Amino acid sequence: DEFRRTLQYVVNPGDPRQFLENFLKIGEGSTGIVCTAFDQSRDRQVAVKKMDLRKQQRRELLFNEVVVMRDYHHPNIVEMYNSYLVNDELWVLMEFMQGGALTDVA
């Protein structure tokens, strides 16, 4: 569909499954799930946010999230490394922060 074609202009090309391994689900939210994985290409642990495009009520928000996170860098903000289209999912690879979900912070 048109949204998917538009999203392809802002995500990275390729398939991250070629260099990610050891996926472990650590959370779930309204837009999808979050896993940790090991990025073999960069020798680091990453967080992978997987969002099913078919289940999103406001898909334009996903587009905005990718563009803003990709272009915005600050030491106090979790860094987004890359984003990919994997079948019907948008995968966002981010800096893994230990300590649990932000919603658990008191």
Image (tube, grey):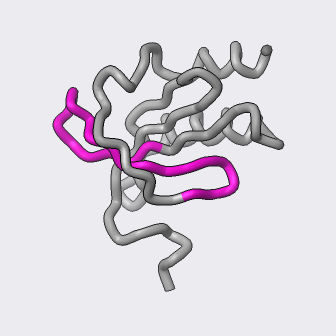
Please tell me which residue lies in front, 44 or 71: 44
Q: Is residue 96 above or below residue 66?
A: below
Residue drawn 58% across and 34% down? 67
Q: Residue furthest left?
A: 43
Q: In percent of the image, x 43 and y 42: which residue is there?
A: 80
Residue 1 lies in quadrant: top right
Instruction: Name the quadrant containing residue 82.
Output: top left
Q: Is residue 17 left or right of residue 42?
A: right
Q: How many marks?
A: 0
Q: Is residue 12 visible?
A: yes
Q: Is 29 contained in the magenta span?
A: yes
Image height of 12 relative to 55, above or below: above
Query: Residue 39 vs residue 3: left or right?
Result: left
- Residue 77: x, y in percent? 43, 56
Q: Is residue 66 left or right of residue 6?
A: left
Toward the viewer: 79 or 2?
2
Give the residue displayed 29% in from the left and 41% down from the top.
Answer: 22
Q: Position of residue 84 (x, y in %)?
A: 50, 25
For this view, does 19 lie left or right of residue 55? Answer: left
Q: Quick check: 81 above or below 14?
A: below
Q: State which region is magenta.
A: 28-48
Q: Is residue 70 above or below residue 9?
A: below
Query: How far across and down, in percent of the image, does residue 105 sit?
Result: 48, 79
The spot of residue 65 in percent (x, y) is: 62, 42
Residue at (51%, 34%) from the top-left corner? 91
Residue extending farthest right: 57
Can see residue 79?
no
54 inside magenta stretch: no
Which is the main secondary structure of the residues drawn in magenta? Answer: strand
